[in-house]
Amino acid sequence: MEISGPVSADRREVPNALECLYATVLVMTHSIISEKLRHGAPDLLLQPNVGSFRALGFLQASAILRAADPVKAEFTEKLARLIGA
C-alpha cells in the first residue's frame, strides 16, 4: 500500500522541524515508489487518500483509517479478480 500521496491543498500550517525531517523521508519514498512503478507495476496497488494528514499524525490513526475506507471495496474487487474468485 502506497501512503505517501500528495498533500492536500487546504493544509496551510507550517510543519515543525521534526515533521520537515520526516517529510523528506516521505518525499524520497514517494520518488522511489514512482520510479519502481514506472518500471513495473505490482499486481495490486492501493493508494488511499490520506494527503490531508501531517507526517507525524500518529494520534489521528482512527481518522486516517476512516479516510482509507473507500479503498476497501477497491481492494476486495481487485483481490477477487487476482485470485479468480
Image (tube, helix red, strand yellow):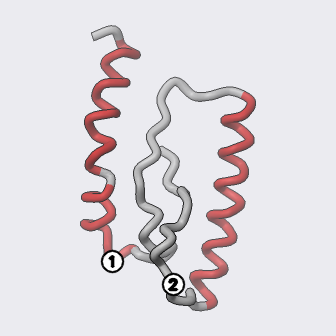
Amino acid, disc 1: Leu
Q: Is residue 67 left or right of residue 19?
A: left
Residue at 37% over, 24% down:
78
Q: State whether residue 31 is above or below residue 62.
A: above
x, y percent for residue 36:
71, 38
Front in this rendered view, residue 19 or 69: 69
Q: Is residue 83 left or right of residue 7?
A: left
Q: What residue lies at 35% left-to-right and 23% top-to-bottom?
A: 79
59 to 75, vertically: above or below: below
Kind of element beneath mark 1: helix
Residue to which mark 2 is pinned: 12
Residue at the top extreme of this rendering:
84
Residue drawn 72% across and 34% down?
A: 38
Q: Earlier in the sequence, mark 2 or mark 1?
A: 2
**Dot 1 corresponds to which residue?**
59
Q: Position of residue 66 (x, y in %)?
A: 25, 58
- Find residue 30 and report its image quarter: bottom right
Q: Between residues 13 and 60, which one lies in front from this camera angle? A: 13
Say which residue appears at 28% left-offset and 40% top-offset.
Answer: 72
Q: Looking at the picture, which amino acid does disc 2 mark? A: Arg
Residue 41 tag number: none
Circle 1 Cα neighbour tier, 10 Å, few/some/many (<14 / 14–19 / ≥20):
few
The crowd level at tag 2 (other Cα within 10 Å; few <14, some 14-19, many 20+) is: few
* Residue 46 position in % (x across, y down): 44, 40
Count of numbered tags: 2
Q: Secondary structure at mark 2?
A: loop
Q: Nearer the viewer, mark 2 or mark 1?
A: 2
- Which quadrant holds the C terminus? top left
Q: Is residue 55 left or right of residue 83?
A: right
User: Does the CB distance between marks 2 and 1 fall below 8 Å?
Assistant: no
